[in-house]
Amino acid sequence: MVFDTASLYFRAFHGVPSSLRAPDGTPTNAVRGLLDMLARLIDQYRPTRVACAWDNDWRPPWRVALIPSYKLHRLAGQPAGIVGAGGVGARSGQSEEAPADLRAQLPIIVEVLDAAGVPVVGVDGYEADDVLASMARQSAVPTLVVTGDRDLFQLATGDTRVVYVGKGVAKHELVDSAWVAERYGVPAEHYADFAVLRGDPSDGLPGVKGIGERSAAQLVAAWGGIEGIVAAAADAGSPMSPALRSRIAGEVEYLGAALEVVRTVDDLPVPPRDLSIRGFVRDAEALARLGDRYGLGGSLSRFVAALDAAASGQASDPAVTTGLSR
């Protein structure tokens, strides 16, 4: 089970009361919310291996070179802070806009995960999405990718499924290719093509004007990926309508570049780490110190209990419904 850490801590920050603070006043809602999310999902699915993927660069320059508008609206005015898994700033030198109370909690999240022995994995010059894709592809066992980002539906193929928490952890959905096909009308392996056609304002991707979800799905269903769609638009004998043909022909350059941006990189040399929960080396003293300093209370206790239960193959809370064992 691999976690899209930023997706979860942003969700925790906005979903958990800001009144949660350490004895010294430091905000802790994102930390505690993240720990509770991890605890609940680890307890439910009882994975044998766990890792938290990190954005070593949330807006890689190579993606910006392809689509300059990529995440442009999310740029913050301050230099990059702790971004990478090792506390290294983004190679781009740019940080994502985030409230000061959230930025203050990122070092704490890294400290707590490190003290718990949970691998935090990032690769310089790449986003957590790429790390997740590479870990899933290289995994010798079935993988669950936990995220609130729909772009990662493209990973829901083969032995990889996506635990989608867009509606919250309690209402999460287990996504495979059949789920994607039923919801969007396209197989998971063509979700990226579909997303490029439709566009995604949250990532600064404009899409093709006049093409929404329905028409994007129809194009993918008829001609497969972007390459097939572009070829059909250029083929006077294809049954594509003149209006669609014109729209596609006018966006060929964008379509090729955007597809490279949206597709996750799945062949990164992910740093070798022991992801087995049973092999995690915990610093109990550091965890206790962090728990006391930041008043993490039950959130930290539940997280540690869930890791211990998964390591032993037992559910830490009998009231929690157990899902698939991974």
Image (spheres, grey):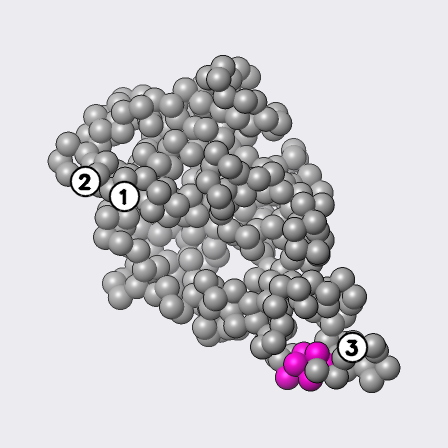
In this view of the protein, which residue sits in the foreground, 116 or 19? 19
Q: Are the two marked residues, 1 and 2, in contact with CB atoms closer than 8 angstroms?
A: yes
- The type of residue carrying mark 2 is Thr
Question: Dot 1, crowdedness within 10 Å: few (<14), some or many (≥20)?
Answer: some
On whether residue 246 falls in the magenta region, the answer is yes
Placement of the C terminus among the 4 image quadrants: top right
- The type of residue carrying mark 3 is Met
- The type of residue carrying mark 1 is Gln
Q: Label 2, on which residue? A: 26
Mark 1 / mark 2, whichever is N-terminal? 2
Q: Dot 2: what SS? A: loop
Q: Residue at x 71, y 45 (%)?
A: 178
Q: Label 3, on which residue? A: 240
Q: Dot 3: what SS? A: loop
Residue 105, which numbered label? 1
Q: Quadrant of residue 223?
A: bottom right
